[in-house]
Image: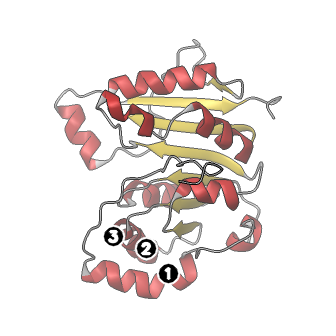
């Protein structure tokens, strides 16, 4: 390993899956219009979307169902989803075509590198990370994406007053996230009581997995934090 380039945290664990015929078709037909290819240089969101609407970034959108629903219900916003698992990208592109979601673009790569190298400073209105890998074994906690350095990086990409929205169904990870965010000089909780956890906002759809868990009595924790005006 190069001492000048230590191993970076990744936003994913690579789990290869087989593409369905529908996913293959969506990748072939929708990617040229709605996909953003790997490349160099800062992304120009006004040029990509053809307007200056606020941009929401979702890191790790899974199969894309909830992101597609968010884009459908908020046409006044633009959405960029980054997901490393190609079957999930194919499924989201299928939904983009089905619902003609002109306000949604997709990247099939590691989000951390894109944020570092291609997302301009202060260009995002919202960053959402829903149900990231909890790495529940204690020896693996260092692999969790929500850590102080990463949160500091996210803050640089958010506009002042922008929203960082996290959600998890692992209580110990929720607490760890809260500790990271509460220690950050860049963010403050949006809960008026000062508590780190907030009710699920209407704009975040319930997933099928989440609905099953809630019926079984499993908890879900939402953290909504605002980027402070004077940070960075």
Q: Mark 1 or mark 3: which comes first in sequence?
A: 1
Q: Position of residue 197 (x, y in %)?
A: 48, 22
Q: Mark 2 or mark 1: which comes first in sequence?
A: 1
Left or right of 130 on screen, residue 36? right
Can residue 198 be seen at all in this image of the molecule?
no
**Of the pair 109 and 219, the residue shown nearer to us:** 109
The residue pinned by badge 3 equals 87
Q: Position of residue 119 (x, y in %)?
A: 69, 58
Instruction: State the separation of the CA atoms marked 2 and 3.
Output: 10 Å
Q: Position of residue 7 (x, y in %)?
A: 52, 49
Q: Is residue 210 above or below residue 37?
A: above
Pointer 2 and pointer 1: residues touching (CB < 8 Å)?
yes
The residue pinned by badge 1 equals 31
Between circles 2 and 3, the one closer to the viewer is 3
**Of the pair 81 and 38, the residue shown nearer to us:** 38
The residue pinned by badge 2 equals 93
Element at label 2: helix
Element at label 1: helix
Element at label 3: helix
Pointer 1 and pointer 3: residues touching (CB < 8 Å)?
no
Quadrant showing the C terminus: top right
């Amino acid at each position: 390993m190069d001492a000048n380039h230590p191993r970076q945290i990744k936003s994913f664990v690579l789990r290869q899956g087989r593409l369905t015929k529908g996913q293959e078709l969506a990748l072939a037909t929708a990617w040229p219009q709605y996909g953003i290819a790997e490349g160099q240089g800062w992304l120009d969101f006004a040029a990509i979307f053809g307007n200056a609407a606020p941009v929401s970034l979702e890191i790790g959108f899974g199969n894309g169902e909830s992101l597609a629903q968010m884009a459908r219900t908020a046409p006044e916003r633009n959405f960029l989803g980054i997901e490393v698992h190609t079957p999930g990208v194919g499924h989201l592109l299928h939904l983009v075509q089905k619902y003609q979601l002109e306000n949604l673009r997709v990247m099939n790569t590691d989000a951390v590198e894109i944020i570092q190298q291609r997302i301009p400073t202060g260009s995002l209105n919202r960053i959402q990370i829903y149900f990231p890998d909890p790495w529940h074994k204690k020896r693996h906690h260092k692999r969790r994406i929500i850590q102080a350095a990463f949160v500091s990086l996210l803050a640089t990409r958010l506009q002042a007053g922008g929203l960082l929205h996290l959600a998890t169904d692992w209580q110990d990870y929720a607490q760890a996230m809260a500790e990271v965010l509460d220690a950050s000089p860049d963010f403050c909780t949006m809960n008026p009581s000062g508590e780190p956890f907030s009710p699920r906002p209407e704009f975040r759809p319930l997933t099928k997995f989440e609905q099953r868990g809630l019926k079984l009595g499993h908890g879900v924790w939402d953290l909504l934090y605002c980027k402070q005006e004077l940070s960075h």
